[in-house]
Amino acid sequence: MNSILPGTPRSPGAESRRNWSRVLGLAALALVAVPAHADPAVGIIAPLANGMSPGADRARPLDVEWPAPKHTPTGQLFKIPFAVPDIRKAASGWDYSGQLEFGLIGGDADEQAARFRTYEDIDNGAFLNNFSLHLRRPKSGYTVDISGGGAGRNDQYYGLQIGRVNQWKVKLYYSETPHLFTNRYKSLWSGIGTSQLTLLPGLTPGGTASTATDNVDVATIAGQNVQTIRLIRKRSGVRVDMDLTKTWKGYVSYALENRQGARPFAAVWGNNPGTAPMEIAEPVDYDTHDILAGLLHSAGLNAFNLRFSASLFRNQISTLTFQEPYRIVPPAGITTVPATGAYTEGRYDLAPSNNAYNVRAEYTRAMPDFYKGYITAVVSAGSWRQDDSLIPYSTTPISLANVTLLPGGSWDSVTALSRRKTDAVVDTRLADLTLSLNPTSNLNVKGKARFYETDNDTDPFLSVNPNAVYADADPAAAGNQTRGLTLDGVTGVWGRPLNDGSGQSILFGTNTNLAGNIPLKSDIYSSKQHKYGTTADYRLTKTSSVNAAVDRETTRRTNREREKTWDDRAKLGYVNRGLGISTLRVSYEAGRRRGDEYMPTSYDDSFSSALASVPSTPGANVATWVRMNSGFRSYDLADRNQYIINARVDTMLRPDLGVGVSGQRRKAEYPNSRYGRTGDSLRSVNLDLSYQPNARRSAYAFYAYQLGRFGQANIASANGALQIGGTTALGVVTPENAVAIGSSPGGPIYPLINEWTAASRDRNHVVGAGLKQDFGKVSLNVDYSFSMGRTRIDYTYTVGGAINAANATRAGTRMPDLATDTSYLDASLRIPLTDRLSARLVYRYQKEAIRDWHFENVDQTPIVPGANAGALPTALLLDGGPDDYRVNWYGVMLHIKL
Amino acid sequence: MKHPRTFSTLRLGVAAGVLATAALMASVAVKPATPALTAPAAPIDNGGAVYVGEAVCIACHATPNKQFTHTQHAEIFRQNPKNELQQRSCEACHGPGSNHLKDPTNPANRSSLVGFTREWGTPVEKQNSMCLQCHTGGPAMFWAGSTHATNQLGCSDCHNPMAKISETGLLKKPTINETCSTCHQQQRAEFAKRSHMPLPEGKVSCADCHNPHGSTTRALIKADSVNELCINCHTEKRGPFLWEHAPVRDNCLNCHNAHGSNHDKLLNVARPFSCQQCHGNGGHQTPLFNAGQLLGAGGAPNVRVLGRSCQECHTQVHGSNHPAGARLQR
């Protein structure tokens, strides 16, 4: 029998057979999609911790026997290790150690403010804070590790790992993460978190004949049903790692992530800009199955990784149907069945289930005899697929002026669609090659080439009803026509009813006038990136080096304003680790993006302008053929000049005191963007102090400052007519120049007097400090931090232009500041009671004050009034938004060493 | 319009197969004694020293050994070494120790052993080469040339192999996040902002998104693109959707800051100003929304500055699968 104990050789043949059987076994596991967990280099780590973990960690005693702390190569203090665990030996040959901490929490820990509980779940009462158990069988190398915490809470976590050292391991884990969005949601519905939102008793689907009555009813019900909107992310998984041979390793993993609950959402009615949008709650019941399998090889000059991953997303709730509480009148040209009060409900098509696959191979070969070089090659191919069944355009049976429905053409039926399934596919491909050479002992140069592609293979969705015909498609032709218009080989009535039939965007829909801005088909976005570059790293001295990099990335996109852009980048860096007690790292990077012609008309093929060119009839209003202010640039495509400076110094002021200072200056300008984002920048300064004289005392402090700016400019559209034959400041409008005149700044649609600018400035201060001090056997730990965030938005405009004189008084020159101040104090006093039992007295103080103008007065006025008493409200803002909180809680924890 | 394909999936599959075959052939052809990738051509011998065995080391370094005993390294070296190097235990990392024994306390003799602290003074390249004897390939495939390598980080700038301070990974701090933030303080400050990933709450780690050992993608992202990374967790936003939003398909960071923000939903800029940095079309997209339109400001309240702003109507901003969802409203 072959022993697997260390030091006992096996026969090569048996080893080989065993290894290949492992390879095949692992491959078989992968084929049957055996569960796994993420690799450190890929996928989700899912750390097993929660908001209580840092405090528990910091309270652990340190190793008083540890020699004086040393520094990392950069010069930062190494943390003194925790006290050596007490190892117990069992007669069975297993060694074990473990601990358990539990206790009681009292005070304000049951505070329900959303901001307090966003990602944590703390409550008053008994509490199992954390536990761990480690078993070792040194003779055979078998290990078992168990850990967990937050038992019974929505941020609980558990892990179990078993294995044999250096041979195999199996890890199972489970972790929950709460995400609480709001605790001030005034629900009008039952069924939150399900596919059906039914109005609560007291409200009438479709409203009553009186908006005033509906308002009263809505206000009454809203005030009675304040709810919390949240979801819980539950992730569980298993991963198997195995050394297949001395040079090959393999792993398979499976994780199931379930997200359940609801999140804030909203629904709008009618045409753009919409009628009475109301805040509803989107149900969330997602399952994501993550499967990973991989092989890792490293031997001699070669290293190779092969990985397969699959992510299968399943939304258990594919649509959301909601009732609405107001009487919404059909717009002109639409009739409903019944004639009034037909809009009782609407329906969303929620996130579609989808699959994603990826296979990736990475290979490196060292070439010690060729300038001590190496070559690295990576290829990766992925595919995202989604084929959900589509739902009808409208939930309400409607008829449109000028449109005759043929059998199967009812807008509330899927037979009115151009296709029944999404059939969407996006493929991704990557090829990456690096050649590294060392021409001299002090110089390393690399050449890099990279190709990345996102190829959307989806056919455009045609917004057409193939089972409908126009009653009169051509106003110039006498009499009704009984055929539709043809685009991309499909004939029918083009456009679609909006928002469950309460609005419409139909070519020739409500009248016989043409329009150029009706979406007829979806845009398919694909992109290709080619990147080439070189880097050089030159060692100046034993402790200093300079590095440089230049590269160009060319991106080609489909259906965007720019087909091609190229980003040039140059970077220079300097590192010096030999500045006495300091280490300096500094770099400067300059970037420049340019591209081919910017075409605001690039979307024309997807609009009704593709079916109808600009009318030539004198007096015709052709404003809808104007797509965009021609001076406007989308910042992700615009010309850009950017530089980034990074600097960092670490200094050992004393053997037990270290300081780190770092900063960043980043600035981007968009030289050709007269409108759109005109610039952005960031300044950041950070200071860290770390003091650690011994295991009984340590302290730290930090401060960070950031100032971020964004600038933008725009012209408020005059929404004026652009009439053929009309005279404008830019000339007489003709069919040929109409779009150019209409889109030009200074034209009738974008008059220069309507220009405005806005400057957003984010300013943040974060300060923190902590102390660990032992007083004999008792030890104190204190951690404090304060974070202050301010965003100031200033704007400029011409009174009488973008804002008229009456409104300018109220508008002023800026928005109120967005402000968030958060304080956090965690203190604990650890008191040993026996060798194995200690108590920990915990005090936590958390306070947050938040001001957000989006929610100013919203909680008090959820029904934003309309233009007059009889009008529908402007909006139903049922989410009261974030709220201040101030929490003090106390805890007594008992800590037991097993 | 679609671009013609430069690399078909089939071609990439063939390329992957070729790489796999090359690796297999290379692994068969390679001799066991061949030095490890990126390791020095000759084993580090610390000036001609010979191995003395860990018992000799422990005789003086008993205290560090108490900690070291509980590390994964110690378990591997002592319970199930796979090769001669791992059997060396202490000297697997520090090199042969006989010269160190000749004058162990003399600072001038520090070149007789590889040390991993600033005080000891071993060049970082030499330190790292000791680690790379074993830690080649796998997640460290792209270490050479990575941002961290270019900045001359030593492995022990993040790791402390001598003590089990972290549950996994032998980090110098108890968690990944604490380890990273010893240098990346700017990012730590971003996680303290109003909206942030649940990193301070312990539910996300830096290594969920970044591979500190190197990547072929900028910012050490452990995916082929930003979007491929984000949708690992945000799978419901993967689509592909019937109606897509171009900058969403292109790069999540067009609108979001991945770490934290002063604004809701980790947005770079407050809504509606955020949306208006791209949307300069006519109609309701271009007005200057202002303080006079807030609730209680005295003017006519405007829903585009209240609550979820533009997303009060355009709820499906990441893409819509509704046939009537061209404006991302259903």
Image (cartoon, rainbow, N blue to C red):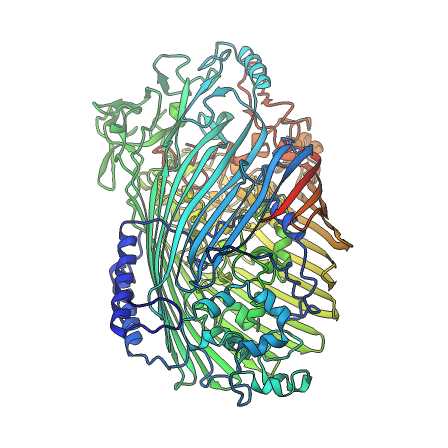
- Residue A198: x percent and y percent? 44, 19
Image height of A703 relative to B15, above or below = above
Q: Is any atom of residue A171 visible in this view?
A: yes
Image height of A214 relative to A602, above or below = above
Location of residue B290 (image quadrant): top right
| Residue placed furthest toward the front | A91
Location of residue A824 (image quadrant): top right
- Residue B133: x percent and y percent? 46, 75
| Residue placed furthest toward the bottom | B48
Foreground: A613 or B222?
B222
Does residue B327 appear to the left or right of A656 in the view shown? left
Does residue B178 appear to the left or right of B128 in the view shown? right
- Residue A597: x percent and y percent? 43, 57
User: What residue sits 36% from the left and 17% below the top?
Assistant: A335
Which quadrant would the N terminus of chain A be assigned to in this image?
Answer: bottom left
Q: Is any atom of residue B209 visible in this view?
A: no
Image height of A398 relative to A115, above or below = above
Image height of A489 relative to A401, above or below = below
Tally of numbered discs: 0
Foreground: B129 or A427?
B129
